[in-house]
Amino acid sequence: MIYSKICGTGSYLPTDVMTNHDLEKLVDTSHDWIYTRTGIEQRHIAQSHESTCDLAEEASRAALNAAGIDSSDIDLIVIATTTADQVFPSTACILQERLGIKDSPAFDVQAVCAGFLYALDIADKFIRTESATKALVIGAETFSRIIDWTDRTTCVLFGDGAGAVVLEAAAVPGIHSTHLRANGAYKDLLSVPVGISRNFEQIINGSAYTQMQGGEVFKIAVKCMEQIAIEALEANDADVEQVDWFIPHQANSRIIASTARRLGVSMDKVVVTINQHGNTSAASIPLAMDTAVRDGRIKAGDNLLIEGFGGGFTWGSAYLTY
Ligand code: COA
């Protein structure tokens, strides 16, 4: 039996930081409101010349370096992103050329904030079926580009960044299981209702923005996050005591705390980066994972429960041994 295993992580955050106090100058809000409602203190924002692929490249090089793997050994690239550099080619193809990787499959996955789980699931299946041996799996976003910076109900929540993992074939897991869900009935609760074949004029006039019914999203997110985490534990006959680190999507500290409480996971086992990063969509889970690997919390052999939730709605989880 062949499994996939994470052998290196990396991440990258743009250098520009926007604090809640900076936002007070843009919209009618306050640090206290944002921090109390969301746990966010600051977020990183890409400069106008920085693209999603730029962030993905930095994160990928850091992950390859941590894994001690040359980019030429990579035989699959999957990027989860909502904010691709171009309509086509995919951000993954642009990255492939930059990293000097030849002929590997390379493609983007779009599942918004659950995108990293979708990308990880796909790469894991490539490796288990011997279609790839070493994969770069990335979550990268310049979400600030699809934010209306005059809308206080959304602009305080999001940030930019990228996280990457190198997955390689292994005789033991690694990834024990992945679990994906989607429900398009919720498509209007969180969306950018603009694209190439619909409302294209809003892209031309620069008003393609995220719209959200925050309260509804909050309630459904908590339920879905609990259900999909339980599914991952049950699939592996694992209980919460066996989880060393719980890494949820970083959307709101109250969603994170509520999910952890429902699962019975103590908060000192939860990786929380939302205070520093805001919601970086598909990048949030690999960014949080890399943070906890580099500061020494996550060690080889630790059991990780990761989960994400995003527009669609899409949601997913994975149970893995680091
Ligand atoms: N600053 C100050 N006041 C704000 C504000 C801001 N940035 N945004 C909204 N408000 C106001 C509202 O206008 C409202 O005022 P009113 O009572 O006079 O009408 C009040 O604050 C409460 O708004 P409400 O939307 O009920 O707040 P909330 O407690 O539900 O928190 C969110 C709002 C967005 C923080 C919360 O709903 C949330 O986090 N939802 C999930 C969003 C999410 O995670 N999305 C991504 C999923 S991947």
Image (cartoon, rainbow, N blue to C red):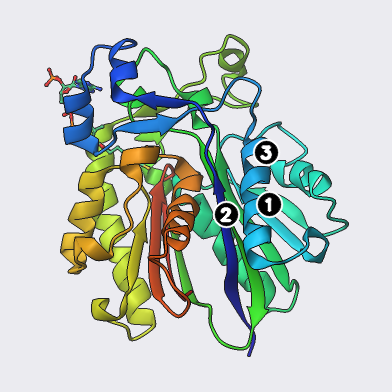
Placement of the N terminus among the 4 image quadrants: bottom right
Identified at 24% across, 42% down, the residue is 218
How far apart in space, not on screen, are marks 2 and 3 (Cα)?
A: 14 Å
Q: Nearer the viewer, mark 3 or mark 1?
A: 1
Q: Which quarter of the rendered image does ligand 1 occupy? A: top left
Nearest to N terminus: mark 2 or mark 3: 2
Mark 2 closeness class: few <14, some 14–19, many ≥20 residues within 10 Å: many
Q: Give the side of residue 116 with respect to residue 184, left or right.
A: right
Q: Nearer the viewer, mark 2 or mark 3?
A: 2
Residue 291's quadrant in the figure? Answer: bottom left
Could you tell me residue 310's position as x and y percent?
41, 45
Which disc, if any, is residue 131? none
Nearest to N terminus: mark 3 or mark 1: 3
Q: Give the side of residue 136 with respect to residue 44, left or right.
A: right
Which disc, if any, is residue 53? 3
Identified at 45% across, 80% down, the residue is 301
Q: Secondary structure at mark 3?
A: helix
Could you tell me residue 153's position as x and y percent?
29, 23
Mark 3 closeness class: few <14, some 14–19, many ≥20 residues within 10 Å: many
Residue to which mark 2 is pinned: 10
Does residue 14 lie above or below 180 as drawn?
above
Q: Secondary structure at mark 1?
A: helix
Which disc, if any, is residue 61? 1
Identified at 29% across, 36% down, the residue is 40
Task: Report if the CB atoms under discs 1 and 2 are less than 8 Å apart.
Answer: yes
Do we see residue 226 in this rendering? yes
